[in-house]
Amino acid sequence: MEDVFDVIAMGLVFNENIRFPDKQIGPLLGGTVSYSAVALGRLGAKAGIVSNLGKDVPNALLKPFYESNVNTLGLNIRDDTPTTTNILIYDRNGNKTIKYLKKAPDITCEDIPEEYFNTKIMYFCPVNFEITAETVKKIKKRSEITAADMGGFGGAHSSEDFRNEFSRNRMSNLRNYTENIDIAKASLEDCTHLFGRKFNDSRDAIKQLLEIGIDIAITTLGEKGAVIGTEKEITEIPPIPVNAADTTGAGDTFMAAFLAEYLLTDDIYKAGLFASAASSILIEKTGGVSIARIPDREQVEERIKRYKLI
């Protein structure tokens, strides 16, 4: 049977406010899963989303999913739960802190529509361990390929309390996840939290991710681009110089674009360049998850040609 979907993204949708040193914007649609699902849809992938929300979610907040043709059968809106609500705070150096005000329940296998298992990639987009290692293991047994953003499995997105608990048995807890994940993205900041040490060399971070069971490891470096590695090769992805207005969602968009293009090309370098171009377009504007910020395939391909990346 042919796959109905290319990628199913799962994680908690945010009702988010973003606080910059000089202003605050929101409420906006936010969260790794929201950026990822909308980016996948905008880039032409057949995408679905799994999340738990409450009836307190404003209808307008979900509009970008519909505008980008994301299948929303897995949006579980319930009477007895709140929608995850947060404040994302940036300091003057660009460092971010996430404060969670309300949180929806964790995502389990029972929250996933049966037809969603007919997909090429199951993509875990947690923000604060809302997908347990046991759930990841169960999903892996029914999935062709699994992918994950490690920011919510002990990386920078995770709350300090959860990270501290995770670090008590760091490598064992980490392997409980990574032994069931094929493709993983982690920023250098994520890697510092995941492994409990700083990385001066991004290739060292890639090697660490590969050593704990990842087949394709991606480390994003912000304005310095990204590095992608497998057991056979490690390749550097150049950045695209732009005037950044808001970097929120850049890594999420990078990973979504990488997955969409990797499914088409089976080439990590081409997929990485495509992802770099997509995220460069996103950060030129602000405003949370919206089709005004997140590019479509035509826009990304035009940027690749403009900068002569391929």
Image: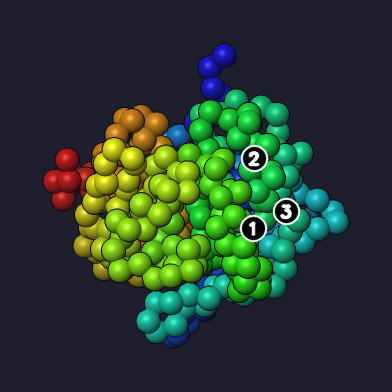
Asked whether, in this view, residue 43 is left or right of residue 6, the answer is: left
Q: Amino acid at mark 2?
A: Lys
Residue at 57 percent of width and 72 percent of height:
98
Q: Secondary structure at mark 1?
A: loop
Q: Residues within 10 Å of mark 3 (few under 14, many from 20)?
A: some
Q: Is residue 279 above or below residue 166?
A: above
Place residue 8 in its image quadrant.
Answer: top right
What's the residue type where badge 1 is placed?
Phe
Residue at numbered disc 1: 129
The three-letter amino acid code for the residue at tag 3 is Asp
Q: Is residue 248 visible?
A: no
Residue identifier under label 2: 137
The image position of residue 226, as x and y in percent, is: 30, 55
Q: Which residue is mark 3?
A: 106
How far apart marks 2 and 3 lie (CA) works out to 15 Å
Q: Could you tell me which quadrant the C terminus lies in?
A: top left
Q: Nearer the viewer, residue 85 or 162?
A: 162
